[in-house]
């Protein structure tokens, strides 16, 4: 190789090295997640854990947050269901993991946070979405059904708040906790009395936890959907139909006719609100239970 060729080769090498350094800087800056309040610099994407993410609203939230750029941990009682949603997200280019966890167990909720941190590095957002409904008049509500509702909807949410706040404090970072309440948490629904009680409880625990955790820069809010067309409403409609002696599809019609915007709610409608509450744009919002119901004219 001549001196001229060696010089040329070195020049090309220098140019390539310069481009490599520039690209590394750009990629690093893109990945930086700077919290100006704390001066904390995290080198990774934000991480959200969503409970009850195997179907319905939880699935919608998981997919929306993944679209927003979150790495997501999907927790649910049935691993195959959360794994299916995680696969969808991963195939679409996101990053999702599936975790088996029953929110009735404090240990399993704490373990789900530990698994999230072990696999994704840290936690920024915890969505307490898992919940069940039960159709019965208040005077006919069985004790075991009341226990199940309270264990999943209320205790499960309290465990989620405890596990998330413990992790945020350990990290020394701000965090966001987002709970599932309902329009039934603002007004009691006939035949959903015990369920409504659990959703009122979520508003109370959201307000109290928001006040207690504000000093740690942890916000706590709730979303209050209306009539969302998920398997939960299929079940409510079927059970109301049985009690009223009307065919499937009839009971929900009455509720749908009371929606000002003229259509049933989709999981994506709820996920859009959660996306906002999980974002930096909601940093100054805490202790709120926000309606997303299409303008229900009566409840
Ligand atoms: N569908 C609706 O119209 C409304 C729903 N909500 C609330 O939104 C949340 C999600 O509701 P949907 O998606 O409609 O319900 P869904 O029944 O379609 O899905 C709920 C998910 O939570 C999971 N889950 C239930 N118990 C669990 C437990 N012990 N541990 C872990 N996961 C558990 C289920 O396996 C399921 O994947 C619930 O908290 C519900 O009360 C609030 C207002 C309206
Ligand atoms: C299931 C539920 O929360 C309502 C209000 O329909």
Image (cartoon, rainbow, N blue to C red):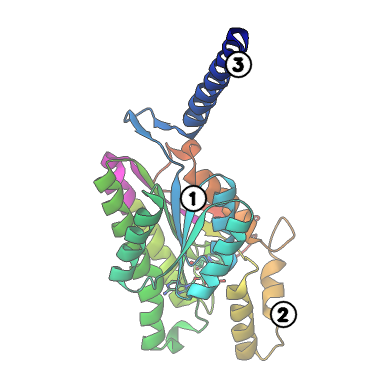
Label 1 vs label 2, nearer the camera: 1
| Residue under the point 33% across and 28% down | 39
Tag nearer the camera, 3 or 2? 3
Given residues 88 and 287, the one toward you in this image is 88
Write down the quadrant of residue 145 in the picture: bottom left
Residue 56 appears anywhere in the view: yes
- Image quarter where the N terminus lies is top right
The residue indicated by pointer 1 is 71
Q: CA distance from mark 1 to mark 2?
A: 37 Å
Residue at left offset 56%, top offset 19%: 13
Furthest toward the front, the residue is: 1
In depth, the one of 131 and 118 nearer the eye is 118
Report, in whole angstroms, how far the alpha carbon at label 1 lies from the one at label 3: 51 Å
Q: Label 2 belongs to which residue?
A: 249
Q: SS for tag 2?
A: loop
For disc 1, the neighbor class at 10 Å (few under 14, some 14 to 19, many from 20) is many
Query: Which of pointers 1 and 3 lies earlier in the amino acid sequence?
Result: 3
Measuring 58% from the left and 54% from the top, which residue is drawn there? 271
Magenta span contains residue 7 = no
Q: Quadrant of residue 218?
A: top left
Q: Which residue is denoted by mark 3 in the rendering?
A: 1
- Residue 54 in view (yes/no): no
Under circle 1, the secondary element is strand
Q: Is residue 269 above or below residue 80?
A: above
Mark earlier in primary sequence (3, 2): 3
Name of the residue lying farthest toward the right: 262
The location of residue 65, given as percent across then percent down, is 54, 50
Question: On the rendered structure, is 15 left or right of 47?
Answer: right
């Amino acid at each position: 190789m001549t001196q001229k060729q060696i010089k040329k080769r070195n020049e090309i090498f220098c140019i390539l090295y310069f481009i490599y350094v520039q690209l590394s800087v750009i990629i690093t800056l893109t990945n930086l997640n700077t919290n100006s309040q704390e001066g904390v610099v995290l080198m990774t994407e934000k991480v959200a854990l969503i409970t009850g993410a195997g179907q319905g609203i939880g699935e919608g939230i998981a997919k929306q947050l993944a679209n927003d750029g979150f790495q997501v941990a999907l927790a649910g009682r049935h691993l195959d269901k959360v794994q299916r949603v995680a696969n969808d997200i991963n195939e679409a280019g996101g990053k999702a993991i599936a975790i088996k966890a029953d929110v009735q167990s404090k240990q399993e909720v704490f373990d789900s946070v530990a698994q999230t941190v072990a696999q994704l590095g840290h936690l920024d957002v915890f969505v307490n979405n898992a919940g069940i409904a039960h159709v019965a008049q208040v005077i006919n509500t069985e004790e075991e059904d009341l226990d199940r509702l309270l264990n999943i909807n209320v205790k499960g949410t309290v465990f989620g708040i405890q596990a998330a706040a413990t992790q945020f404090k350990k990290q020394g970072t701000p965090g966001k906790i987002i709970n599932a309440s309902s329009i039934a948490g603002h007004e009691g629904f006939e035949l959903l009395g015990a369920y409504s009680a659990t959703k009122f409880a979520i508003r109370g625990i959201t307000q109290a936890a928001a006040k207690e955790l504000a000093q740690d820069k942890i916000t706590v809010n709730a979303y209050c959907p209306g009539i969302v067309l998920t398997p939960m409403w299929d079940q409510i409609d079927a059970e109301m139909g049985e009690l009223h002696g009307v065919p499937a599809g009839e009971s929900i019609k009455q509720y749908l006719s009371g929606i000002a915007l003229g259509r049933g709610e989709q999981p994506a409608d709820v996920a859009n609100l959660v996306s906002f509450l999980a974002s930096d744009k909601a940093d100054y919002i805490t202790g709120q239970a926000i309606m997303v119901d299409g303008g229900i004219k009566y409840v």
